């Protein structure tokens, strides 16, 4: 019987456990965590089969070890595993948000012939903790793999174990990974937090302050609500890439600031035109064979039952909806509803269906 050890039963670790149990009930899942309360909750809610606070001891009997803590804990776990006599064919993987530091920490283990595959599911939630986990957290999300020295058979073994996640697998190098996530994830979090802080300071003397913040402001700063401790660790572990990205962003702001000061209308127009052109072109045409999602934006009235009507029509037509997001909705103003599908054909069918029901389609992308 396969025994899987998951160290770290937060949102990601508990979601992995639930997804594995859903498709492989014969697998024994052992949960390890520093918090005894977390372990009690995990066992009480049948998220795992067994619990332990002794990571080293549990690792000796494991066939698969999943390191699901913060990157600093993952690297410490890898150093610890390198001192143990693990099963000869054990597979070790992680879900850390930076990969170069993790892959460096895995070298001593790999030198002993132990298989290690770096991993990072690009999914999450504003909720945290063991009880926030859910089996479908990763559905249709990208899951980046950094195989390192692992062979094809080991990669397939990991993907088979995690088949219940229903993710889109992509293989990258550690350098590619850290550069990509720095620009599309880490930098936006810094920018969102900075904008919220700057806005709070700027409006500190206003009675209304952030009370009027809604719509676009709330949408682009949503990620500023992320866990401060986790994001501190991420920034410190990917410092070179993030500081480089920040400098590039600062340069962009400096240029547009100069254009505004000089009242350089053509430069300001070029600034927005370039951004619009790039943003509107995001999609399969630009990404080639990279698996993608297909979005449909429509206006929905701010009234009881509006969202339910949309989703019920899609369900009745058996059209698979990957994600749904309200971009802006206020009293007496139509909301913009973003519907995400996994194929262009489904997107087109949904657009036709909803247009026939008199919903205004804003755009497709």
Image (cartoon, rainbow, N blue to C red):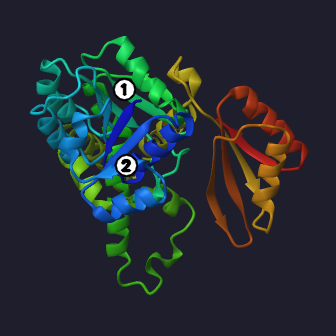
- Where residue 41 appears, x then y in whole percent? 41, 62
Q: Nearer the viewer, mark 1 or mark 2?
A: 2
**Could you say which is closer to the camera, residue 224 or residue 91?**
91
Question: Would you say residue 227 is visible in this rendering?
Answer: yes
In the rendered structure, find residue 193 and report the number of the disc placed on it. Answer: none
Asked whether the beta carbons under mark 1 and mark 2 sit within 8 Å of each other, the answer is no
In this rendering, the count of numbered labels is 2
- Where residue 207 appears, x then y in whole percent? 44, 87
Q: Which of the two labelled residues, at mark 1 and mark 2, occupies the earlier sequence position?
A: 2
Name the side, left or right, on which 152 lies relative to 81.
right
Please name the residue shown 53% across and 23% down the image: 286
Which element type, helix, strand or loop, lies under badge 2? strand
Please name the residue shown 17% across and 21% down the image: 110
Name the side, left or right, on which 20 lies relative to 297.
left
**Could you say which is closer to the camera, residue 265 or residue 244?**
244
Q: Quadrant of the C terminus?
A: top right
Rendering quarter of residue 306: bottom right
In this view, the residue farthest toward the bottom is 207
Q: Which residue is mark 2?
A: 50
Name the side, left or right, on which 32 lies relative to 130.
left
In the picture shown, does residue 316 fall above or below 140?
Answer: below
- Where residue 17 appears, x then y in whole percent? 44, 44
Q: Which residue is mark 1?
A: 145
């Amino acid at each position: 019987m396969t025994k899987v050890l998951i160290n770290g039963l937060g949102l990601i670790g508990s979601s992995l456990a639930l997804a594995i149990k859903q498709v492989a009930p014969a697998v024994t899942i052992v949960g390890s965590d520093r918090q005894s309360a977390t372990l009690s909750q995990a066992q009480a809610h049948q998220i795992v089969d067994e619990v332990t606070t002794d990571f080293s001891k549990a690792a000796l009997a494991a066939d698969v070890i999943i390191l699901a803590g913060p990157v600093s804990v993952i690297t410490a776990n890898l150093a610890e595993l390198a001192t143990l006599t693990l099963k000869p064919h054990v597979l070790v993987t992680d879900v850390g948000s930076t990969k170069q530091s993790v892959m460096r920490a895995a070298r001593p283990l790999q030198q002993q012939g132990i298989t290690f595959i770096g991993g990072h599911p690009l999914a999450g939630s504003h909720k945290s903790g063991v009880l926030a986990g859910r089996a479908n957290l990763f559905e249709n999300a990208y899951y980046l793999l950094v195989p390192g020295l692992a062979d094809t058979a080991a990669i397939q073994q990991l993907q088979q174990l995690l088949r219940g996640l229903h993710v889109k697998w992509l293989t990258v190098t550690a350098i590619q990974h850290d550069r990509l996530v720095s620009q599309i994830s880490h930098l936006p979090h810094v920018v969102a937090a900075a904008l919220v802080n700057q806005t709070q300071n700027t409006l500190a003397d206003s009675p209304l302050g952030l009370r009027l913040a809604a719509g676009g402001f709330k949408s682009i700063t949503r990620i500023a609500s992320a866990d401060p401790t986790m994001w501190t660790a991420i920034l410190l572990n990917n410092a070179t890439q993030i500081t480089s990205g920040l400098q590039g962003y600062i340069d962009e702001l400096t240029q547009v600031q100069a254009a505004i000061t000089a009242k350089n209308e053509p430069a300001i127009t070029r600034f927005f035109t370039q951004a619009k052109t790039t943003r509107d072109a995001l999609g399969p045409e630009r990404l080639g064979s990279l698996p993608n999602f297909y979005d449909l934006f429509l206006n929905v009235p701010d009234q009881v039952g509006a969202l339910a009507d949309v989703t019920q029509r899609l369900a009745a037509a058996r059209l698979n909806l990957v994600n749904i997001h309200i971009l802006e909705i206020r009293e007496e103003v139509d909301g913009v509803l973003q519907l995400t599908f996994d194929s262009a054909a489904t997107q087109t069918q949904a657009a036709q269906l909803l247009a026939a029901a008199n919903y205004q389609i804003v755009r497709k992308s």
